[in-house]
């Protein structure tokens, strides 16, 4: 086979492999959505609450991680603090279901269906949305759709800074500028035009900017340290792992494990979780995703600075070697 034909076959094979990989990466998590250890509160008198908890464990084994609390007040506090996605409050008049659709509209919908089964043959148990999603985005579709643009723009910014900008100071300045401007733009669009994120503008912009910095910093850092292979590794990690495993359109507990946890350890998933915390829950549950984003951003900055410094030191080392050779 001639060389051009071999290259054509290799290019087609590579393209098909990439296509298959992307279909699996984006389609598989959505096709396997199911409740897995979803934090759920059962509140009420001890005996009645134990009966409901036992029934749930028997009917849906492994679906819920059940925590028993004494009363409705404690259950509401647990939802507001992001300790649970929903609660079943056992009362003399029958069970009541409380959900927090702002944490996950998908789980809130499943708990609403559960309310119909709790009542037996009678009317469905009443459902109260304690922390509702934004009224203009009740199903969270617009919120989930923001993750991919954030990932793609972060990859593009990191690649452009790596290829077009030389010097650690200017690359780091570019990362900082992208984070500030990108965060401001994302928050402005999401809160004013799309109206899908409530909360303080500066807090939302700060989270969006930090998420952008984490993605772009990883791309720039690995690209600076490892060259083109580093760029490819960072881009594929953010796009093929970070985006589909972010849980932005569902919840980490609905994804196959341990992939839901893996997604929360990557910038896209951490950004989505942190945005929910600052926009709907006054910062509750923000510590873990904030730590993830700071770690990725810090690692990217360090790799960028170290990579540029190493590249600058090579000519100096070579000059010293040449001088030593001439003297000898």
Image (cartoon, grey):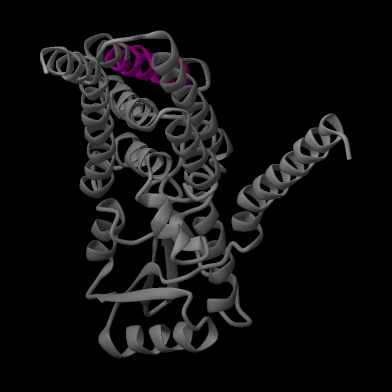
Residue 318 lies left or right of residue 214; in this view the side is: left
In front: 227, or 41? 227
The quarter of the picture where residue 188 lies is top left
Location of residue 304 with respect to 292 vertically, above or below:
above
Q: Quadrant of the C terminus?
A: top left
Instruction: Please indicate, yes or no, whether residue 124 appears anywhere in the rendered image.
Output: no
Please report the bounds of the magenta region as a residue range: 175-191
Number of marks in picture? 0
Magenta stretch, overall SS: helix
In magenta segment, residue 188? yes
In front: 322, or 59? 322
Q: x and y percent of residue 216 in the render?
A: 38, 26
Location of residue 75 with respect to 327 vertically, above or below:
below
Residue at 39% from the left image edge and 20% from the top image edge:
187
Q: Quadrant of the N terminus?
A: top right
Residue 174 lies left or right of residue 192; in this view the side is: left
Residue at 30% from the left image edge and 28% from the top image edge:
210
In magenta segment, residue 93? no
Q: x and y percent of residue 255 in the render?
A: 52, 60
In front: 273, or 67? 273
Location of residue 79 with respect to 182 vertically, above or below:
below
Instruction: Please indicate, yes or no, whether residue 114 appears anywhere in the rendered image.
Output: yes
The residue most toward the front is 328
Q: x and y percent of residue 253 in the render?
A: 45, 62
In front: 49, or 13? 13
The quarter of the picture where residue 300 lies is top left
Residue at 26% from the left image edge and 16% from the top image edge:
172
Q: x and y percent of residue 59 in the render?
A: 54, 85
């Amino acid at each position: 086979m001639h060389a051009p034909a071999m290259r054509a076959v290799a290019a087609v094979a590579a393209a098909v492999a990439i296509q298959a990989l992307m279909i699996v990466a984006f389609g598989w998590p959505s096709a396997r959505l199911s409740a897995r250890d979803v934090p759920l509160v059962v509140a009420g008198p001890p005996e009645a609450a134990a009966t409901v908890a036992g029934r749930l464990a028997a009917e849906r084994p492994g679906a819920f991680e059940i925590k028993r609390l004494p009363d409705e007040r404690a259950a509401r506090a647990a939802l507001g603090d992001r300790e649970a996605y929903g609660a079943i409050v056992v009362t003399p008049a029958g069970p009541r279901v409380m959900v927090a659709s702002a944490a996950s509209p998908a789980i809130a919908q499943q708990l609403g269906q559960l309310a119909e089964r709790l009542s037996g043959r009678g009317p469905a148990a009443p459902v109260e949305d304690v922390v509702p999603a934004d009224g203009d985005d009740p199903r969270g579709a617009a919120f989930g759709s923001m993750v991919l643009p954030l990932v793609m723009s972060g990859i593009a910014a990191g690649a452009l800074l790596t290829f077009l900008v030389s010097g650690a100071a200017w690359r780091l300045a570019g990362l900082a500028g992208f984070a500030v401007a990108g965060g401001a733009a994302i928050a402005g669009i999401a809160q004013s035009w799309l109206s899908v994120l409530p909360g303080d503008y500066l807090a939302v912009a700060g989270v969006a900017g930090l998420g952008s910095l984490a993605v772009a910093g990883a791309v720039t850092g690995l690209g600076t340290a490892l060259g083109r292979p580093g760029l490819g590794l960072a881009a594929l990690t953010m796009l093929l792992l970070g985006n589909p495993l972010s849980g932005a359109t569902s919840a980490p507990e609905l994804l196959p494990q341990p992939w839901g946890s893996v997604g929360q350890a990557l910038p896209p998933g951490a950004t989505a979780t942190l945005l929910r915390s600052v926009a709907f829950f006054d910062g509750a549950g923000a510590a873990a995703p904030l730590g993830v984003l700071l770690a990725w951003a810090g690692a990217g900055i360090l790799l960028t600075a170290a990579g540029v410094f190493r590249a600058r030191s090579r000519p100096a080392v070579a000059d010293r070697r040449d001088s030593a050779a001439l003297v000898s």
